[in-house]
Amino acid sequence: MPDALLPDPEQWRVLPPGLRRLRRTLLVLGTILAVALTLLISLSVGGWPWVLLTAAPLLAAIWAWWSIGAGWRTWRYAEREDDLLISRGVLVRRLVVVPYGRMQLVDVTAGPLARRFGIAKVQLHTAAAASDAVIPGLPQREAARLRDALTERGEARSASL
Amino acid sequence: MRPPDGTPPWSRRTGFHRLHPLTPFLRGWVIVAAFAATVGRNFAEDVTARAVGLTLIFLIPAAGTYGYCAWRFTRYRIERDGLRLDTGLLVRRTRYVRLDRLQSVDIVQPLLARMIGLAILRLDLAGRERRERSDSDGGDSGSDLRYLSIGHAHRLRAELLATAAGLAPDAGEAPHHPLAEVPPRRLIAAIALSPEPWAVLFGAAAIATPSLLTGTRAGGLGAIPLLGWLWHTTFRIFAAGYPYTVSESPDGLRIDSGLLEHAHATVPPGRVQAISVGEPMLWRPCGWVTIRMNVAGAGPSVLLPVARRDEALELIGKLLPGVDVAAVALTRPPRRAALLAPIHRRALSCGADDVVFVARHGLLHRHTDLIPHGKVQSIRLVANPLARLLRLADVHLDTTGGPVRVRAGLRDQAEALRIVAVQAERSRLGRRSALPDRWMT
């Protein structure tokens, strides 16, 4: 289905599959833990019918599995000449435009698990707290490139408040 | 800086200055009060004169020593393009305030300080809020000089503003002429016409009446906090809004206000990020409006508590040259938006001209929000599931923290995308034509 809320076909870039893999790995680990706990509790509390309770974490996990995939698919970004575009959201669609000259700082963060998957998060800050421009995962090399490109363009187009 | 009369030789040699010697007394009593509160809570059961005496014997010298040392180790100096502020007894901290990033300079006089002729000089920088949040050691005194004598504070402000403008530091205080004032009668009428005091009054009456009728006094006590609130919504607003003078000078916008606590704020030219004109329903027959604004950092947020509409528009025209709010063509959301906003669709509208984007919302309390294209920090388009079903979307134009949030609600999706694209382009051009950091050069 063509998306009515995406501006003209720019150079949209998508997120790496590693991010989806990372999130789903975490989800599977969490689900196993939750199911084990539910089983333990239900068996100690009552009889066999209580085992049906494990359906709850399983259903939640299926929904989360889907929403991770959908979120990953819809999250994209584009570097234009003067600004960065980020489009995301499954239910609530969002499109953020951050002019390079407005960026105050660019954060690149990678936790230990994210590093194993070769993933880093890029976050842009402007003087407005509402700006909310995040790219949740990029291959580390791409993240570093983007950070350098953004800061370089930011300096060239920098404007005071 | 030309040393003020009676500067000790130490200061003349290094160029550093200290705060007013009475500072420790003003700051110290806060510590004493805090300790007293803690001690009082802990010993509430068995307070003896001896315990209080012992505490005071230890407390007063301790507070005094701390206050003296804190004062002794705090010093500041004006350098070529900034102000250097050294603080800290154990952990020394040197803060360098870059004057070309100055968002506003305020002189604030709390009642106690005002009685002995002292003032706080507050320097606001962009992005200060964020730093404060990450700072654990309470950033409120970050770039404050507290306390200075009032005359010295005025001289220092003039000097800082002249330096920030790119003039010689001893250019003196820039001439200023008043743009708007708030007549006390209008302010009183405006407070009487605002809903909050009446709501509080009725609330208090509703709580107190039954208990007064039945003759039990205890129930009436519940109304006392509400009376405090009444004072808050009436007299405090009056004391903050009268006298109130907005004036214009080459250093920027000056706002002098306060009956008991004096505040003199100076916002350099081009530092106003966004403006909101509020029209409460009851004020509309009188044609009064209130103007609020966003200034980066923790600058003033009220521009005029109450003004006539033509005065307000004129003032906005002075602040944002070339802007005529009344002339900006506003359009309403499409008819189908009525499904999501059956009543207030009629109050929503937005539009833009060459200089500003204007968005209007609110049926009872109508807000007209303005943001110059050059001040837009980021542009966001948000569409929730219901809005998407109707092919609608909201467009937010983000600005620095403050009371004003600019949002064009429930636009047609295609139009929203167009607004985003056009606004990105306008903001790019708007930034290019922005004022330089040093506005007099």
Image (cartoon, grey):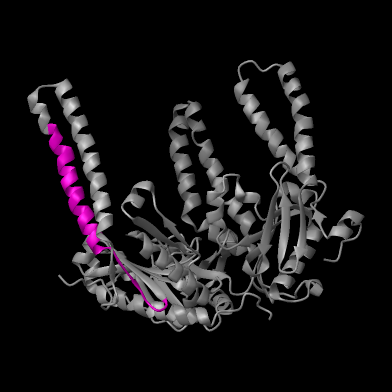
Q: Position of residue B34 (x, y in %)?
A: 65, 34
Q: Position of residue B268 (x, y in %)?
A: 64, 71
Residue B35, by quadrant, is top right
Q: Nearer the viewer, residue B55 or B320?
A: B55
Relative side of A138 to B241, left or right: left
Q: Nearer the viewer, residue B173 or B303?
A: B173
Residue positioned 67% across, 72% down in the render: B247
Residue B309 colored magenta?
Answer: no
The reply to whether residue A91 is in sight is no
Task: Specify the segment rendered in magenta.
Answer: A53-82
Relative side of A106 to B62, left or right: left
Pick out the residue farthest to the left.
A49
The reply to whether residue B348 is in sight is yes
Q: Position of residue A38 (x, y in %)?
A: 19, 31
Q: Nearer the viewer, residue B42 or B246?
A: B42
Relative side of B61 to B268, left or right: right
| Most frequent secondary structure within the magenta stretch | helix
Residue positioned 43% across, 81% down in the render: B426
The quarter in which the N terminus of chain B is drawn is: bottom right
Residue A79 colored magenta?
Answer: yes
Give the mark count: 0
Does residue A151 sit above or below B425 in this rendering? Answer: above
The quarter in which the C terminus of chain B is drawn is: bottom right
Relative side of A105 to B350, left or right: right
Residue positioned 57% across, 45% down in the render: B136
Q: Position of residue B12 (x, y in %)?
A: 88, 60
